[in-house]
Amino acid sequence: MADTKENILWTALRLFARNGYAAVSVSKIAGELGITKGALYKHYKNKQDIFDSIIQRLYEADAERSKEYKVPEKIFDDEPLFYRDVAIENIRAFINAQFRFWMEDEFSVNVRKMLSLERYRNPLMAELYQKVFAGGPVSYMEDVFREMMKQSVLENDNPKQLAIEFYAPFYLLLSLFDVSSNNKEIVELFESHVEKFIKEHINRTRFSKKHNRKDVRV
């Protein structure tokens, strides 16, 4: 039974990514699986229930990566102390993992395609797209950078501008990946961007003192 529910979710997601959420009916999902609508309704109440389960799984995966790389899981207002203690090394590892996730993971790639198709058709989808791919990540990183500046981890600057600068190549390179056959080059370009960004904005005086040498590689 669990396998059937999982197959429904994956089949629906692939159809949503290919045709758009609005164009896919419960009948279409059931037909793709070779089951009746009644059999599908034993696992999901309706198409919206399937969609909600997809997005919930996406959020859960994001939370798991946040825990793994020891970066904040929630917005600043919910856990301000965690934002004040996050390390630049963890941000580096986390953002590289995030990039690979959105580039290589089949589930996330299909979510990205689905939301990209629907954001121009449905205001709720547009809002979700912003939360997942644009305004949400930028606001998150703005809070991280602001707190890092307060702790003298980064040089003082405009945190929102830095967040935009930090994230812009993330989405540009994902777009290039969609039409590229050289995945390795795309990953290397992004990781190079992250390294360059850190070198340009880290507080070198504090970092050098912390490591007791001036030629430390960051």
Image (tube, rainbow, N blue to C red):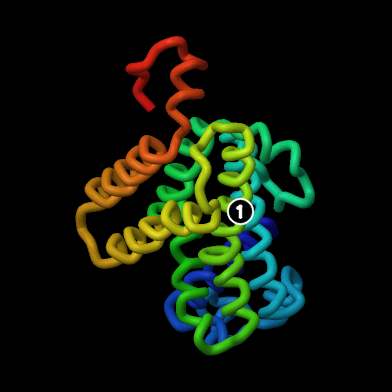
Residue 165 placement: quadrant: bottom left
Q: Residue furthest top?
A: 212
Q: Amino acid at mark 1?
A: Tyr
Q: Residue at x 58, y 42 (%)?
A: 65
Q: Residue at x 53, y 70 (%)?
A: 13
The image shows residue 54, relative to residue 193, as above or below, that is: below
The quadrant the N terminus occupies is bottom right
Q: How far from the left and from the top, in percent, is residue 64?
A: 63, 43
Q: How far from the left and from the top, in percent, is residue 22?
A: 56, 87
Total count of labels: 1
The quadrant the C terminus occupies is top left
Residue ID for mark 1: 140
Q: How far from the left and from the top, in percent, is residue 169?
A: 36, 57
Q: Secondary structure at mark 1?
A: helix
Q: Is residue 184 left or right of residue 156?
A: left
The image shows residue 131, relative to residue 165, as above or below, that is: below
Residue 171 placement: quadrant: bottom left
Q: Residue at x 47, y 31 (%)?
A: 203
Residue 66 placement: quadrant: top right
Query: Which one is nearer the viewer's eye here, 177 or 209?
Result: 209
Query: Which one is nearer the viewer's eye here, 115 or 77?
Result: 77
The image shows residue 31, relative to residue 3, as above or below, that is: below
Query: Which one is nearer the viewer's eye here, 120 or 8?
Result: 120
Query: Which one is nearer the viewer's eye here, 122 or 60?
Result: 122
Q: Is residue 196 left or right of residue 98?
A: left
The image shows residue 208, relative to residue 94, as above or below, that is: above
Density class for disc 1 (Cα within 10 Å; few <14, some 14-19, many ≥20) is some
Q: Residue at x 37, y 39 (%)?
A: 200
Q: How far from the left and from the top, in percent, is residue 157?
A: 50, 48
